[in-house]
Image (cartoon, helix red, strand yellow):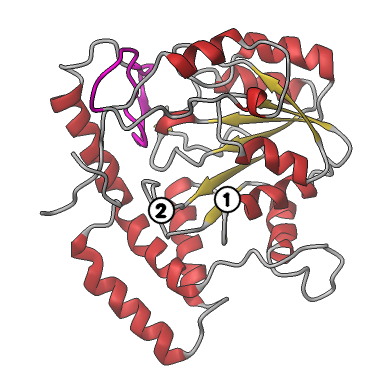
C-alpha cells in the first residue's frame, strides 16, 4: 500500500464547483467557504471551531490568549517539534514529560512529578497516531484541580473519539493540523476548537492582524477560500474515511500484528498511523524517531520516550476511496 492523500475522487466535481464559485465571486479569502469549513468542523467535533492557515497559527493564538509568556509549559517529548516550539515562540519556557509505552502519549505519573518540579502554567497533551491519549481523563481532572491550562495537540486525531467525546473537548483548547499527510488535508491549514467564547473571539482577531481595533497583536494566519473548500469536502467524507481505515485495520492488519497498539474499550482511532511494537521491513517509519528533549539539548532522561523511539514501527494504512 503506497502513500496517497486521503482525497476521494468522487469529491472532485463538488470541489471544482466550489472553486468555480470562488473564482466567479472574486472572494478568495475571508469568504463563505471558510465559514462553511468552520461550521462543518464544529458540527463534527461538537465544539466552536476557527480555521487557520496552519496548526502553528492556531496554537500561537491559544498560547497568547492564556498569557503564557515568561511561564513554563510542560510538553511530552514524544511529539513533533511544532508542539514545544509553539510555546517557545509564545515566549514560554518548555520542559518535557515522559510518555507511556502502551499509547505513546503523555504519562500521567511523570506529569505529576514534573508539575511539582516546574510549577507549569500550562500542559500540552498530544494525541499520537490518531487515537486519544489513554490517560486524558486523569490529566484533565488534575489540571483543572491545580489551575493549569490544558492544551490538546490534535494534529493526528481527526475522526477519533472516546465515549462519544472528540479530541479538543477535554482541554481548554484543541488544535488540529490539515497538512498534506493528514487524514483530512487542505495542503496546509489548521483548526482551533474550544468552548471558550473569549478565546474564539480573540483568535478571530489574532489570525487577522488584530483587525480592526488592533488591541490583539496578531499577524496573518487566515486560511484561503480554496483550501477551505477542500476542507469542506474532506470533512463531509471524514466519517467514511475513518470507518474505512478501522475496517481495513481490523480485517487486514490486526491478524498480522498481535504486538500492535491496542485501544481501551469505546475508543475509536482516526488511524493516522497504525502502530506496532515489532520491526517490519515495509514500515512507513516511526511516528517520531528522535525525541524533542534530545533535539533541544536537554540532558535529563525520559526512559519510556527513548524506548518508544526505538521500538515501534508503522505498517502503511492509507485511505484509497472509491477506486
Secondary structure at badge 1 equals helix
Left or right? Give the position of 211 relative to 79. right
Which residue is labeled 1 in the image?
55
For the point 57% across and 56% down, the residue is: 54
Q: Is residue 300 above or below residue 235?
A: above
Using a 10 Å C-alpha cutoff, classify the residue at mark 1 as few (fewer than 14 neighbours), some (14 to 19) or many (20 or more).
many
Residue 237 percent across, percent down from the top left: 29, 54
Mark 2 vs mark 1, CA separation in Å: 12 Å
Whether residue 269 is in magenta: the answer is yes
Quadrant location, the C terminus = bottom left
- Coordinates of residue 158 in the picture (x, y in percent): 42, 43
Q: Position of residue 313 (x, y in %)?
A: 35, 22
**Could you say whether the residue bearing mark 2 is in a helix, strand or loop?**
loop
Q: Which of 91 and 234 lies nearest the eye of the viewer?
A: 91
Magenta region, residue range: 261-282
Percent across and percent down for residue 281 are: 24, 22
Above or below for 31 versus 310: below
Instruction: Residue at 49% x, 58% y: name it.
Output: 188
For this view, does 64 lie left or right of residue 96? right
Secondary structure mostly seen in magenta is: loop
Q: Nearer the viewer, residue 323 or 290?
A: 290
The residue at 38%/65% (across/down) is 230
The residue carrying mark 2 is 180
Amino acid at each position: 500500500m503506497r502513500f496517497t492523500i486521503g482525497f476521494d475522487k468522487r469529491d472532485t466535481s463538488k470541489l471544482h464547483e466550489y472553486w468555480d464559485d470562488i473564482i466567479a465571486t472574486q472572494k478568495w479569502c475571508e469568504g463563505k467557504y471558510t465559514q462553511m469549513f468552520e461550521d462543518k468542523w464544529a458540527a463534527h467535533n461538537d465544539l466552536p471551531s476557527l480555521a487557520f492557515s496552519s496548526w502553528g497559527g492556531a496554537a500561537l493564538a491559544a498560547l497568547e490568549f492564556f498569557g503564557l509568556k515568561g511561564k513554563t509549559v510542560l510538553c511530552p517529548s514524544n511529539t513533533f517539534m511544532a508542539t514545544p516550539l509553539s510555546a517557545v515562540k509564545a515566549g514560554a519556557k518548555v520542559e518535557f514529560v515522559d510518555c507511556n509505552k502502551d499509547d505513546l502519549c503523555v504519562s500521567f505519573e511523570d506529569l505529576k512529578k514534573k508539575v511539582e518540579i516546574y510549577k507549569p502554567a500550562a500542559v500540552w497533551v498530544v494525541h499520537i497516531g490518531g487515537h486519544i491519549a489513554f490517560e486524558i481523563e486523569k490529566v484533565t481532572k488534575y489540571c483543572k484541580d491545580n489551575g493549569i491550562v490544558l492544551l490538546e495537540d490534535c494534529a493526528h486525531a481527526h475522526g477519533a473519539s472516546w465515549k462519544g467525546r472528540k479530541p479538543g473537548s477535554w482541554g481548554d483548547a484543541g488544535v488540529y493540523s490539515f497538512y498534506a499527510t493528514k487524514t483530512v488535508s487542505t495542503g496546509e491549514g489548521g483548526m482551533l476548537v474550544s468552548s471558550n467564547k473569549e478565546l474564539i473571539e480573540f483568535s478571530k482577531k489574532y489570525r487577522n492582524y488584530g483587525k480592526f481595533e488592533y488591541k490583539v497583536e496578531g499577524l496573518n494566519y487566515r486560511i484561503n477560500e480554496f483550501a477551505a473548500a477542500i476542507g469542506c469536502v474532506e470533512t463531509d467524507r471524514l466519517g467514511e474515511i475513518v470507518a474505512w481505515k478501522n475496517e481495513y485495520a481490523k480485517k487486514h492488519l490486526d491478524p498480522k500484528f498481535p504486538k500492535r497498539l491496542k485501544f481501551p474499550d469505546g475508543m475509536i482511532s482516526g488511524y493516522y498511523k497504525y502502530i506496532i511494537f515489532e520491526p517490519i521491513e515495509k514500515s512507513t517509519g516511526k511516528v517520531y524517531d528522535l525525541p524533542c528533549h534530545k533535539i533541544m539539548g536537554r540532558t535529563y532522561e525520559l526512559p519510556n520516550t527513548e524506548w518508544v523511539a526505538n521500538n515501534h514501527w508503522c505498517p502503511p494504512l492509507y485511505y484509497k476511496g472509491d477506486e
